[in-house]
Amino acid sequence: MDKKLIQILVVTALATAAFLLVAQTVFGTATTTSVTSSATVTTTAPIVSFVSGPNGGTAISLNANTTTPISVAVTVTDYNGCTDFNNSTETIALFRGDIASSSCLTSSTPNPLFCYVASAFSTSTCPGGFTANATTTFSMYYFASPTDNASYTYNGKGWQGAITVTNPAKLSVSTTSATTTLNSLEAISSTPSSIAYGTLAPAQVNSPSVTTTISDVGNTSTTFQFSATQSLTGGVPTTTLVTSSQQYATSSGFTYGTGYALSSTPVTLNGVSIAAPISTTTVSTNIFWLLQVPTGTPTGTYNGTNLFTGQSVN
Amino acid sequence: MKHSFRKFSRLFFIAFAFAAILLLGSAERSLAAFGISPPFINADHLVPGVTYSQTVYLVQDQPDQNLEIRAALSVPDHIKPWISFDTGNDFIIPQGTRQFPVQITITVPKGESLGKYTGNVSFQSVPGKTGQVTIALGVNVSLSLTVGNDIYEKYSVPLIAFPDIEEGWNPKVAVRFENDGNIPESFDAATFDLYDEYDAVRLAFAEKQSGFPITPPFVTSNYVIEFPTSFHLGVGDYWAVVNFYKDNQAVASQKTVFHVLPAGSLSPTGLLLSSLKTYWYYYLVGLIVLLLIGRRLWIFRLRKKRAVVE
């Protein structure tokens, strides 16, 4: 009896299922209600993150007397897609760590000693989807503040990147990067590139003195050392003048015998240092040179090499 | 009238040319700038047996020709054998090079007693002759070395990046570890959280407790850490958060988007596999054709053999 009941129930269930299936197949379309759907896609603010500190997080070493390209890399995610990213505006800054990012980002006349601003990415790719990779390259001047020495004001502050991205719907976001150390740069240049004493007779001293101008073209204060790596040599028979035949001083009016005698080992010029430049304005000092040809020196052309060595003031 | 004007023009031209020659002839040639960055080495935490290296950059602003350089040490004789340059003492900065790296290595012998030493490394340019007295420019690197017996621990992680990977690969994290201390360092643990492209759903979590590269004292190392996960990463963008721990403290972290590219985008093997997967039917047809040709050749050779025997 129970077995039969179960059979009946199973058959009924199967029949009902078959009926529903047929009904759905045959009448399904007829019973479907047409529904209009709509949705409003809102604009989201972009999400920005720095890949690392400036220069890939590697300490920055600058070129002497010119600019150095330094890059900052960011990732920008805009869920409204690459079109939104491409139509966004951005301000990117590279600044010394003690400066407020906002003051650099909004500066109309940034001081290259501590702040650089760009209004567009140098390169960017948005390979589909909604995440873009972008890089901005700044031309950093040789005098930008170093942050790598305990005796410096800005030691340990580093340099940072900052960015503000504003999408077409005027939603904006700002962020800053980790810091990167800016290395000290000790660099000098000299004008002219040689000292011409002219034609002199034995015992004669050149007059006026020859002027050389030495410039600090790095970002540290510097002192100087002078020496001769090759004493004046020439004449027939070949003769080498004593190194101390050349004398130098910081005042143009010095007379031979009152200056510093040149030697073959570098000697620091005491009391003379040049402060680090803070702009492209040249910071330099003049050194004046006299030569007295020793008596008994044979006639001829004499050549030599003097070494000007810069020593950073730590 | 016309004749005198022509004469005047000619005289004016000659005077102008003469003045120009005088001016050019007396123009002072400036010597290309020469420098070093950084101009000091402060190795204050050396211990006996340790090796310390630092790269300094010789820089110039007009690299229009090869520049000969001589390096010289001005330090106590006792420590001279400790110091070496990867370039040797005499070398040439090639034309076109604005920044030339020189690695200065200091190796403190084992058993060395405590001490403090100062001195200079000087780099002197050797320019071609330019006049009676040629001016050469030089720069000094100040050395300050202290040999002690203390443990000095200092490190930083200036770079954590998520390199692009191919679909199916495990996530990877590139790390730059700067060890400025005098003992070897490494991370103890790391966690990796993987999120979907909207940074909304966490898809996977991975953890590492060992296998981190050890960075020797005074060395910067770059390495890649892989985070194996059972989650299959398909093509697309993902958010990831990585945390590195040392002594049970988070010491470095990064959160950003990374890209998963189609197989074969980054590796040649992946490219082959991807090609096989996509164009398998061509490969199959090619294989069948090759097999048929081989069979035909085999039958042909067999018949030829039989003909020779008969």
Image (tube, rainbow, N blue to C red):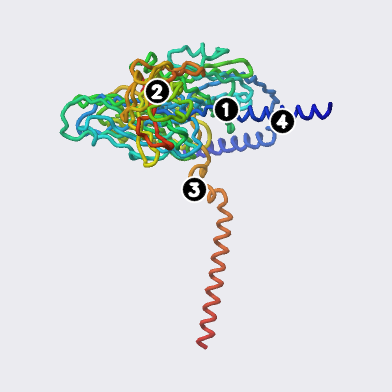
Q: Nearer the viewer, residue A161 or A295?
A: A295
- Residue at screen point 31% across, 29% down: A265
**Which residue was labeled with disc 2?**
A184
Mark 1: secondary structure: loop
**Which residue was labeled with disc 4?**
A30
Q: Are marks 4 and 3 in contact (CB under 8 Å)?
A: no
**Tag 4 or tag 1, which sits nearer the N-term?**
4
Q: Where residue A69 sits: x, y (%)? A: 51, 28
Residue type at mark 4 is: Ala
Residue type at mark 3 is: Pro
Residue type at mark 2 is: Ser
Q: Pointer 1 indicates a residue of which chain?
A: A
Q: Where residue A107 sits: x, y (%)? A: 55, 12
Q: Dot 2, how many residues are within 10 Å of its Cα: few (below 14), some (14-19), or many (20+)?
A: many
**Which residue was labeled with disc 1?**
A122
Alpha-carbon span between mark 2 and mark 4: 82 Å
